[in-house]
């Protein structure tokens, strides 16, 4: 539904190997303009299933080499947390649970949507 109303988008990402492919990112989207303000993207190595199934390669278009060149989950989550913190500081955004009085707040509210 969000894609239908234009709130989510797919964006081309250039992976480390230089090939331009369709991929999904986590994005900060300005819902008033529809513009992507910031994004985070990473491939994660799977310690439990290091070889991708046919389903995993066909549906999202992920290649085995991209996962092989990815990072462990712990590193990905650390990078993601740093991205969130940097984005919050740069864009002056906070999550709704951190605001006591929304009417006097000068910050922009944000939320995750997957």
Image (tube, rainbow, N blue to C red):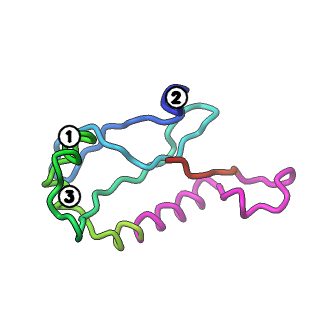
- Read off the residue under disc 1: 58
- Read off the residue under disc 3: 67
- Vertical placement of 79 versus 3: above or below? below
Where does residue 25 sit, x and y in percent of width and height?
39, 47
Q: Which marked residue is nearer to the observer: mark 1 or mark 2?
A: 1
CA gap between label 1 and label 2 equals 25 Å
Q: Which marked residue is nearer to the observer: mark 3 or mark 1?
A: 1
CA gap between label 2 and label 3 equals 29 Å
Secondary structure mostly seen in the magenta stretch:
helix
Q: Residues within 10 Å of mark 2 (few under 14, many from 20)?
A: few
Tell me which label, 3 or 1, sits earlier in the chain.
1
Is residue 12 in the magenta section? no
CA gap between label 3 and label 1 equals 14 Å
For the point 20% across and 58% down, the residue is 67
| Residue 81 as seen in the image, left or right of residue 61 | right
For the point 64% across and 51% down, the residue is 110
Q: Which mark is residue 6?
A: 2
Is residue 80 in the magenta section? yes
- Vertical placement of 93 versus 77: above or below? above
Where does residue 48 sit, x and y in percent of width and height?
23, 69
Q: Which image quadrant for residue 85?
A: bottom right
Q: How many marks?
A: 3
Q: Which image quadrant for residue 61?
A: top left
Mark 1 element type = helix
Where does residue 23 sit, x and y in percent of width and height?
30, 42
Mark 3 element type = helix
Magenta residues? 78-107
For the point 24% across and 65% down, the residue is 45
Query: Which residue is outermost to the top?
Result: 4
């Amino acid at each position: 539904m969000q894609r239908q109303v234009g709130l989510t988008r797919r964006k081309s990402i250039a992976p480390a190997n230089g090939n331009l492919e369709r991929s999904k990112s986590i994005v900060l989207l300005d819902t008033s303009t529809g513009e992507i303000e910031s994004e985070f993207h990473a491939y994660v190595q799977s310690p439990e299933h290091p070889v991708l199934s046919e389903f995993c390669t066909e549906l999202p278009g992920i290649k085995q080499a991209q996962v092989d060149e990815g990072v462990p989950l712990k590193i990905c989550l650390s990078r993601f947390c740093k991205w969130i913190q940097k984005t919050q500081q740069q864009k002056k955004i906070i999550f709704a649970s951190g605001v006591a009085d929304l009417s006097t707040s000068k910050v922009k509210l944000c939320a995750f949507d997957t």
